[in-house]
Image (cartoon, rainbow, N blue to C red):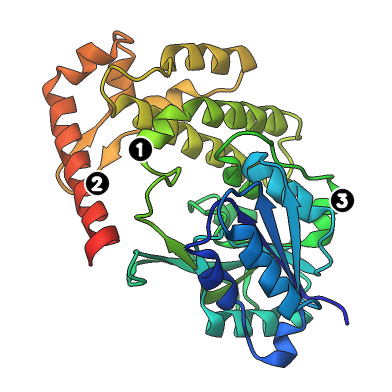
Amino acid sequence: MNKILSIVVPTYNMERYLTSAITSLFVSAPLFSLLDIIIVNDGSTDNSLSIAQDFARQHPDVIRVISKTNGNYGSCINSALKVATGKYIKILDADDSFSTTALSAFINHLTTEKADLVLTNYCIINQRGKRIKSMHIPLKPSPHNELTHTQLAAVAMSMHNVCYRTAILQQIGYEQTEGISYTDMEWIFMPMSAVNSIKYYKLELYKYLLGRSEQTVDEQIHLRKMGDEEVSIMKNIAQLQSLHPSNAAYNYLTLRIFQRLRSVYHGTLAQPPTNTFNLKAFEDKLKSTGFDFEECTNNMSINCIFFNYHLIQNWRKTYNQIVLQQTIGYKIYHFIRSARNAYNNFCYKYL
């Protein structure tokens, strides 16, 4: 039977969450047989591999396990891409899950779908499984659910939204960077250059868990791994510069780089001056590429109902983070940011 959807589940020491992730994919029997579930065990030292193998033994026609030495997130995606048989492909992180009801509807859509990229919505849940926030794409598709690259350039997408036609990844020989973190951002970058048609279904399919300790979105972990972010961003810039500006995705990809740069600047400048990431040296590398980033990043600010502070522009006056943190503007910025983060952490852990 032809498979409609390959679902890649990268797994590293996720014994606490893996069962929930996989059982969320258990749609009704006729639809379940259309899935190609690939669990990639990335050298786990806990019971993750045993759990994955149990599922594969129970459902050998649907679930497969790849067990490999640890190579980080990108190596899991690359391993799965080599064996994926589905018409479409989507990633599910092992600590997240899908809405089973929405997945059933999604599979039905994909059986007749021909678009290169199919988008859905997602929500953020906390450790108790409670929905904290719905993350819907704020776009209105055509009557036939079609979107354009121009429309996408106006929104911040994530890997949770996207599902590609597997053939386009094979056509461009897509590979993610191995051995570093934050390569999930690459999943919504270079493949877009091969996308010619886009569909958007307003299904809240993906459930993104926040609040788990050791997540790479944690600010302190992000700061420690900022060098990984740098490697991936520089790769994205080189990929963008290899494309002709007439490529339909060019403006979208440019925006994605600026969004990633915002994460680096704010993640670094928001931290105490004891951080080890050299932001000025990173800027010098950016300048050497010829990528025009300064004017746009100068005007990146932290926006809220009370305050609009041009953090990066003020840092560039001295290139001194200690001086920046002594300004009144930064102190207000830091207070607002800290309060927001504290509220989010409370929601993720206790609501």
Mark 1 vs 2, N-terminal side: 1
- Residue 171, numbered circle: 3
| Residue at which label 2 appears | 341
- Name the foreground residue: 32 vs 184: 32
Mark 3 vs 1, N-terminal side: 3
Residue 54: percent from left, percent from top? 67, 72
Q: Secondary structure at mark 1?
A: helix
| Residue at which label 1 appears | 219
Residue at (59% x, 59% y) in the render: 48
Q: Is residue 348 left or right of residue 232?
A: left
Instruction: State whether residue 33 appears in this view.
Output: yes
CB under 8 Å between discs 3 and 2: no
Residue at (54% x, 85% y) in the render: 101
Amino acid type indicated by mark 2: Asn
Q: Is residue 87 left or right of residue 142?
A: right
Mark 3 vs 2, N-terminal side: 3
Dot 2: within a 10 Å radius of its alpha carbon, few (fewer than 14), some, or many (20 or more) residues? Answer: few
Extreme-left residue of the structure? 328
Rendered view: 156 above or below 302: below
Q: CA separation, marks 1 and 2?
A: 10 Å
Dot 3: within a 10 Å radius of its alpha carbon, few (fewer than 14), some, or many (20 or more) residues? Answer: few
Which quadrant does the C terminus fall into? bottom left
Q: Secondary structure at mark 2?
A: helix
Residue 99: percent from left, percent from top? 51, 77
